[in-house]
C-alpha cells in the first residue's frame, strides 16, 4: 500500500496541474471550489462501495459524504470510527483524499498569493522569485515544490513512526509501515484522522510518537510561502517577508501560550492530565496545543476536559495556522493584522507599521471582513445546532469552530448530531476550508484606485 | 418622595457642572471615572446604613457595593431582591444613584462628542450648533438640555404608569406615584431595577405598562445628540448627521429583528411565551427585544428561555443603543461602522461611504479597537467565571455580557456567583459603562497627522 500512494499522488498532481493551467488564469476561486467538490463527490462514491466498510454492508450516503468532506477538507471530524467502520480499502480512500486536499489547499493558497502579489505589482520576495523563475514562479514549479516538501516530510515522519511502532510496540513490519504512512500523511496535512478508536490517547506519554507528529503538523501549518522562504534564507531572518515573520512569531506565541494555558487548566483534572507523570503532562499539554491549530489529533480525552479549556481551544482553532499551508482557521496573519491595528490605535499612531514596514491599508479592511463573516457564520451555525440538539453551548460552539477551522476535534457529540446538523457541519468544513483563502485573495485582487471621494464625516464610537 | 427627587437632581446637576468646568478641559476621562467612582462609593456608604435594609440588619459590603455599582452604571444586575431586601430609604438611594448615573453618562457622552468634533475641526451639525451657541454648545447648555429631556420624559412616563397602577391595579395614590416614579426613572435611564421580585413579569400582557416603558427606554437609548437633532429638524431626515441616521436606522433594524427572533424562538416555550395569548406573545417578544438593548427589565422569565434566545440576546446586549445616551453596549454606531466596512469591502469599494458621506478612515480603526478589546475582556471574564463556578458557558457568557453592556438581565445566577466572581461583575459594569465611551473619545482626540510612512507591505489574509 505504501508504494501505491505516491503513484496515485503523482497522477493526481498531474491532473491538478492540467486543471490549473486550463482554468486558473480566469477564475481561481471557481477552480478550487469545483476541484474540491469533485474530490468530495469522488470520495463519497468510493466510500459508498460496500468494500469500503469492514462489515461489507456499505456506508450510508451521509456517512460517506461526511467522511469524504472531512478528509478532503483535512478536518478529521468523524461520525463513524475510522479503524472499526472502514475497511483497509476505505482507509486508503480516506488517505488519498487527505493527500489531495492537503496538496490542494497548499498549492492553491500559494498560487493565489503569487497571483495577488503580481496583480498588485508588489515585488515581494515571493513574487520576485516567481518572476525571475529562480524559485517557484509558474504553476508547475509551485506544484512540484509543494509535492517535494510534502513527500520529504511525510516520508521522514512515516519512517520514524514505523520504526517506533515496530521497536516500541512490536507491530509487524507491514502494519508498522502502513500505520506510519497513514499517520504521517494525516499529520503533515493537518487532517487528524487516526487508525485508533481513541485517536492518539494511547501514545500520550510517548515522545517518539508525539514530538515527530507535532513537528510535521507545525511544518505543514506554517504554509508553503514560509517554508520556501525559510529554505532559501533561514539564516537571515532580517530579510524575511512580513508574512514569514508574522507566521513564525505568531506560531511561537500561540504554541507556547496554548501549551501553558492547557497544561495549567488541566493539570489537576484526573480525566485528562491529572493521572499522568508531570513530564507527561507537559508533553501532552504541548502536544494538544500544537494539534489544536489545526491538526485535530488528541492524546487526551477532549470530552473530559474543562469547559474553560474548550473555550481556550476555540480561540486557538479559530486562529489556526499560517496561510497557504495545510492548517485551517482564519490564519495567524489575519489576527496579527488585527492585533497591530489595535496596538497602533492604542499608541496613537496613524499608519500601522509591522517590523519596519507599513501595513497596506487595504489589508486592514480585508482582515476585518474575513473575521466578521467568520464570526457571523460560526454564530449562526451555533444557534442552528443549539436549536436542533440539547447539547450545551460550549460543546456546540466547539464543534462548529472545529468544523469551520477544519480542526476535527470534538467533545464527542459529532455522531449524535441529527442529519440536518451534520449537513451543516459538512458545509462548515467546506466553507471553512476554502472560504477564507478565496475570499482573502478575491478581496485583494479586486483592490482598485480611488476615483473620487465623498466629504468626510464620523459618527460617535463606543 | 416624588418631590424630593428633582431637588436632589438639581443639586447634583449643579455639582456636576462645577466638576465639569473645573476639570473637563484637561482630563475628561479622569473626570468621568472619578465622578462615577465617587458616586459608587457614596452609594455604597448609604446602602451600608442599617436603615437602608428592610430588616434593619444592614447589607454586607459586597451587597452594597454590587448594588451601588449596578445602580450608578444603570445596569440592573442584583444579588439581593430590590423590593424585599432594601427599605424605602434604600430604594430611594438606588433611584438617586440611577438618576446620577444615567444623567452622567448622557452628559459625558455628549460633551465628549462635542469636544471630539471641535478638536478635529469637524463642523458637524452638533459642533456647529455648539459653536453658534444656538443649541447646546457649552457645558451648562448640554447639562440643562439633558436634564430637561430627562425630566420631561420621566415625568410623562411616571404619570402614565401611576394612573395605570391606580386605575388598573387599585394601588393607593401614594404607592402608585412612587411606583410610577421609580419605574419611570429606571426605564428612561435604562437601569432595569424594578420594585417587584419577578421584575415586570406580572405585567407581561399589559400594553399600558409595557409600551410606555418601552418608549422611554428607546428614547433614553437613542442618546442625547440624536434627540437634540430630532428635536430641531425631525421633519428633514435628509439633513440629519450620519450619527443620527445610523442610530435611527440601526435601532429600527435591531428592534424589529430582535422582536421577530425572540418571538419565534420562544413561541412554543410553555415557560415563557407559550402560555400566553398570541397578541400577548407578540407584545412580550417586542418588549423583550426593546429591553435587551439595554434596559434590562424582563416581562418573561429569562432563566426559562431557550439558550438560543440567550445567545441572540448576547448579540443584542453587546451592540446596545446609541452613543451618548443611557444605553450601554458598544453602541449601534460602532457596529454600523463595521457593517459598512464589510459591505464596502465585499462590493470592492475603496472608501467607505454611508448615506453619501465618506466615513473617516480613522474611525475604522477606532471601531475595531473598541470591539476587539471588548471581545477580549468578555472572553477573559467568561473564562474566569467558568473556572470558579459550575454554570454552563451559555449562562456565564450571558451574565458577563449583561454586566459589561450594563443590561442587567440574568439567567438567575448572579446571587450564586462567589464573591470574587461578583467583584469581576462589578468591574465589568464599571468598565463597560465608562470604557467604550472614554476609549472611543480618547482615540478620536488623539488623532494626528502622518509625519512619515514606511514602505508598504502585505501579508496573506485568510
Ligand atoms: K484537521
Ligand atoms: K440596564
Image (spheres, coloured by chain):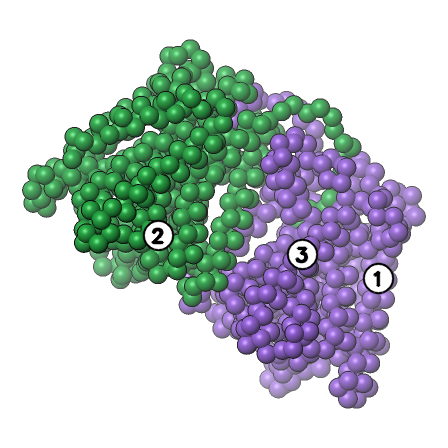
Chain colours: A purple, B green
CA gap, disc 1 and disc 3: 24 Å
CA gap, disc 2 and disc 3: 38 Å
The residue drawn where x is 62% and y is 67% is: A263
The residue drawn where x is 72% and y is 63% is: A101
Q: Is residue B128 left or right of residue B188?
A: right
Q: Mark 1 points at which residue?
A: A149
Within 8 Å: ligand 2 and the Cβ of disc 2?
no
Label 1: chain letter: A
Circles 2 and 1 on the same subunit = no
Vertical position of residue A412 compared to residue A108: above or below: below
Vertical position of residue A208 compared to residue B131: above or below: below
Neighbor class of circle 2 (other Cα within 10 Å; few <14, some 14-19, many 20+) is some
Percent x, y for residue A198? 62, 79
Circles 1 and 3 on the same subunit = yes
CA gap, disc 2 and disc 1: 61 Å
Numbered disc total:
3
Of circles 2 and 3, the one toward us is: 2
Circles 2 and 3 on the same subunit = no
Vertical position of residue A113 compared to residue A40: above or below: above
Q: In which quarter of the image is residue A204?
A: bottom right
Closer-to-camera residue (A135/B198): B198
Of circles 1 and 3, the one toward us is: 3
SS of the residue under disc 1? helix
SS of the residue under disc 2? helix
The numbered disc on residue A254 is 3
Mark closer to the chain start, 1 or 3: 1
Q: Mark 2 points at which residue?
A: B62
Amino acid at each position: 500500500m505504501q508504494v501505491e500512494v505516491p503513484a496515485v499522488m503523482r497522477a493526481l498532481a498531474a491532473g491538478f496541474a492540467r486543471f490549473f493551467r486550463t482554468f486558473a488564469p480566469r477564475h481561481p476561486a471557481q477552480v478550487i471550489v469545483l476541484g474540491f467538490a469533485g474530490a468530495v463527490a469522488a470520495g463519497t462514491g468510493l466510500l459508498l462501495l460496500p468494500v469500503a466498510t469492514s462489515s461489507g454492508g456499505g456506508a450510508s450516503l451521509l456517512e460517506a459524504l461526511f467522511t469524504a468532506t472531512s478528509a478532503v477538507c483535512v478536518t478529521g471530524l468523524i461520525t463513524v470510527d475510522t479503524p472499526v467502520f472502514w475497511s483497509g480499502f476505505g482507509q486508503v480512500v480516506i488517505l488519498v483524499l487527505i493527500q489531495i486536499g492537503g496538496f490542494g489547499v497548499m498549492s492553491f493558497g500559494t498560487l493565489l498569493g503569487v497571483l495577488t502579489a503580481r496583480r498588485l505589482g508588489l515585488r515581494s520576495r515571493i513574487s520576485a522569485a516567481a518572476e525571475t523563475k529562480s524559485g517557484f514562479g509558474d504553476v508547475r514549479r509551485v506544484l512540484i515544490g509543494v509535492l517535494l516538501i510534502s513527500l520529504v516530510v511525510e516520508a521522514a515522519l512515516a519512517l520514524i513512526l514505523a520504526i517506533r511502532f515496530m521497536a516500541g510496540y512490536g507491530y509487524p513490519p507491514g502494519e508498522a509501515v502502513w500505520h506510519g504512512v497513514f499517520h504521517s500523511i494525516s499529520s503533515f496535512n493537518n487532517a487528524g484522522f487516526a487508525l485508533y478508536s481513541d485517536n492518539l490517547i494511547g501514545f500520550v506519554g510517548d515522545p517518539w510518537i508525539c514530538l515527530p507528529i507535532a513537528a510535521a503538523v507545525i511544518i505543514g501549518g506554517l504554509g508553503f510561502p514560509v517554508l520556501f522562504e525559510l529554505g532559501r534564507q533561514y539564516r537571515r531572518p532580517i530579510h524575511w517577508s512580513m508574512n514569514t515573520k508574522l507566521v513564525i512569531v505568531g506560531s511561537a506565541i500561540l504554541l507556547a501560550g496554548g501549551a501553558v494555558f492547557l497544561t495549567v487548566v488541566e493539570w489537576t483534572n484526573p480525566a485528562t492530565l491529572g493521572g499522568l507523570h508531570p513530564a507527561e503532562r507537559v508533553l501532552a499539554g504541548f502536544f494538544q496545543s500544537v494539534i489544536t491549530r489545526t491538526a485535530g489529533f488528541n492524546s487526551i480525552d477532549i470530552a473530559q476536559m474543562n469547559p474553560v479549556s474548550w473555550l481556550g481551544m476555540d480561540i486557538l482553532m479559530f486562529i489556526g495556522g499560517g496561510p497557504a499551508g495545510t492548517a485551517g482557521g482564519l490564519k495567524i496573519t489575519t489576527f496579527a493584522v488585527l492585533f497591530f491595528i489595535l496596538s497602533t490605535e492604542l499608541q496613537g499612531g496613524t499608519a500601522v507599521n509591522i517590523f519596519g514596514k507599513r501595513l497596506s491599508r487595504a489589508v486592514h479592511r480585508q482582515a476585518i471582513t474575513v473575521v466578521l463573516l467568520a464570526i457571523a457564520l460560526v454564530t449562526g451555525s451555533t444557534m442552528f445546532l443549539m436549536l436542533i440538539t440539547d447539547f450545551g453551548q460550549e460543546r456546540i460552539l466547539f464543534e462548529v469552530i472545529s468544523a469551520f477551522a477544519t480542526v476535527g476535534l470534538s467533545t464527542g457529540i459529532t455522531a449524535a448530531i441529527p442529519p440536518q446538523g451534520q449537513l451543516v457541519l459538512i458545509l462548515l468544513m467546506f466553507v471553512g476550508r476554502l472560504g477564507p483563502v478565496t475570499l482573502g485573495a478575491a478581496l485583494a485582487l479586486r483592490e482598485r484606485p480611488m476615483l473620487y471621494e465623498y466629504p468626510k464625516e464620523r459618527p460617535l464610537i463606543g
